[in-house]
Image (cartoon, rainbow, N blue to C red):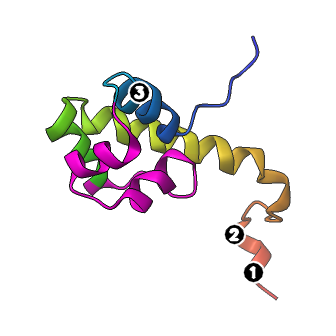
Amino acid sequence: MAMHTPVHPGDFIKTEIVDAHGLSVTAAAKVLGVSRPTLSNLLNHHADLSGEMALRIEKAFGVSMDTLMRMQAAYDIAQARKHAGRVRIHRYQPDSLRT
């Protein structure tokens, strides 16, 4: 069974919250009490979802911040795994540090 890459939470927020409520990015930012560039950066994957932003979304739109933060964690894990080959680390062996 093929694994899929989790979506960035910005995609979910844009489609399921901003677009679903017929809001512009500017209007949604106003509802959330943040600047338009702050929200735009999240929606366009230029920023990660912070705990504070997740809480704002929960309070304004009723989407659980726990769910949103799990989405961010799943996305981060998938991105790290995608680039795992670039990390050159050998498994620790207790005797390997003794010389």
- Which residue is identified by label 1? 97
Classify 32 as above or below 97: above
Q: In the rendered image, is residue 48 in sight?
A: no
Q: Is residue 52 left or right of residue 78?
A: left
Which range is magenta? Answer: 23-52
Q: Amino acid at mark 1?
A: Leu
**Figure quadrant of residue 7:** top right
Residue 19 tag number: 3
Q: Is residue 97 left or right of residue 36?
A: right
Ranked by sequence position, the earlier of labels 2 and 3 is 3
* Image quadrant containing the C terminus: bottom right
Give x and y (percent) for residue 15: 46, 26
Which residue lies at the image location 71% right of the left edge and 45% below the top edge? 81
Q: In the rendered image, is residue 57 in sight?
A: yes
Q: Nearer the viewer, mark 2 or mark 3?
A: 3
Q: Amino acid at mark 3?
A: Asp
Classify 7 as above or below 35: above
In the displayed orientation, state which residue is furthest to the top. Answer: 1
* Majority secondary structure in the magenta region: helix
Q: Nearer the viewer, mark 1 or mark 3?
A: 3
The CA distance from mark 2 to mark 1 is 7 Å
- Which residue is identified by label 2? 94
Give x and y (percent) for residue 71: 45, 36
Do the residues under discs 2 and 1 have CB atoms within 8 angstroms?
yes
